[in-house]
Amino acid sequence: MKRMAVAAVAVLTGALATTASPAAVAAPQPSAGLLAAMQRDLGLDAQQAAERLRQESAAAVLLRVAEGFAGDSFGGAWFDASTGKLVVGVTDAAKTDRLRRLGAETRTVAHRASDLDSAKSKLDAEKAPAEVTGWFVDTRANAVTITVKRGQASAAQAFAAKAGAVAKVVETDEAPRLLKDVRGGDAYYINSASRCSIGFAVQGGFVSAGHCGEAGDTVAGVDRSAMGTFQASSFPGNDYSWVKTNASWTPTAKVNHYGGADVVVSGHTEAAVGASICRSGSTTGWHCGEVEAKSQTVNYQEGSVSGLTRTNVCAEPGDSGGSWVSGTQAQGVTSGGSGDCTSGGTTYFQPVNEILSVYGLTLITG
């Protein structure tokens, strides 16, 4: 047992010595895209971005060893971009010299990382007041930081008390919200009643069929959360509309393939008669066929609509408004048709180029 313990210490010491030398850590091989994003968002040049990745890789290796060495006195660690080094917090000052020799910077802190984690877990088990926007283990501050809406700090005091002495209340202007994608072919709900399908995302929202709603109608997304409001709609005569979405929804170039990878729209070049075409809708999913004719007038019971494109693709109620693509080019939004996806049918779509032109909208492409 004694020989085993000595061997373990030797292995640990070797690992520590290795991690203390940045050159001993293999340099990562970052992609050109990653380096470009770091230069853009962190204000670095290419050499600085590559060097930072190397430093972070070395710090990640050192962290595992330093945490084991610090044991119960470990108070958390973080990478300091200004020095390119790992900073390790410890509650036992006697361990700082050894950690420095390993290449880390040190801070003597009041609270162990395990105590901070325990305090946060207590908050996780509580119902937070609406004024509180979040809480986290703040390693640099050696505290559990609770963020609260500006001017509302007093509303968080009772909640913060659950975490004890490690709690720190900070006012913020941040207002966290869910970030959800606007994706062609997904369902949306009009006035909490009828359902249609998204056509294509545009800057500020999405386009769909005109018969799905009128200006002012409210829209809920596929998850039934508030999504936006119809800004304009034309039906009959035409069959198009556009919906302005709220800040919780992010327009994307994606179209739901229903069972396959999303199609990413790259443009809106009109396909020829005879070309293959596919559509996405929230009732029947993904179906394909061919363009049979253009500039068709369809005499629906509710009134006639002109300028539609005829296809031999099936569709069913609820697919209305959904996306039509040829390859990765946006073509239009579902208007109506006959038949179904069991026996087959004929379906018409409203060309998207007319919608973009009439409303002055810009298609989201990828």
Image (cartoon, rainbow, N blue to C red):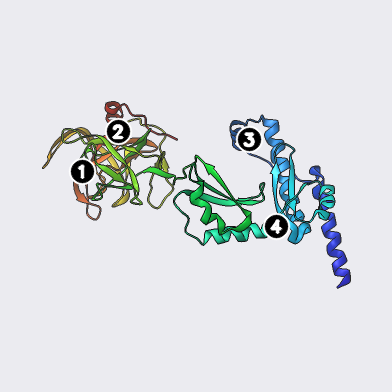
Q: Secondary structure at mark 2?
A: helix
* CA distance for labels 1 and 3: 48 Å
- Marked residue nearer the N-terminal end (3 or 2): 3
Image depth: mark 3 or mark 2 in front:
3
- Marked residue nearer the N-terminal end (1 or 4): 4
- Marked residue nearer the N-terminal end (2 or 1): 1
Q: Secondary structure at mark 1?
A: strand
Say the numbered circle drawn on residue 87: none
* CA distance for labels 3 and 4: 35 Å
Crowd band around label 2 with a 10 angstrom C-alpha radius: few (<14), some (14–19), many (20+): many
* CA distance for labels 2 and 1: 15 Å
Say the numbered circle drawn on residue 352: 2
Image depth: mark 1 or mark 3 in front:
3
Q: Secondary structure at mark 4?
A: loop
Instruction: Using residue 55 as the reference point, say whether residue 329 is left or right of it.
Output: left
Tell me the residue at 28%/28% (across/down).
359
Q: Secondary structure at mark 3?
A: helix
Quarter in which the C terminus is drawn: top left
Instruction: Using residue 304 as the reference point, say whether residue 366 is left or right of it.
Output: right
At label 1, the amino acid type is Gly
The residue that label 3 is drawn on is 35
The residue that label 1 is drawn on is 336
Instruction: Using residue 50 as the reference point, say whether residue 323 is left or right of it.
Output: left
The residue that label 4 is drawn on is 112
Image depth: mark 1 or mark 4 in front:
4
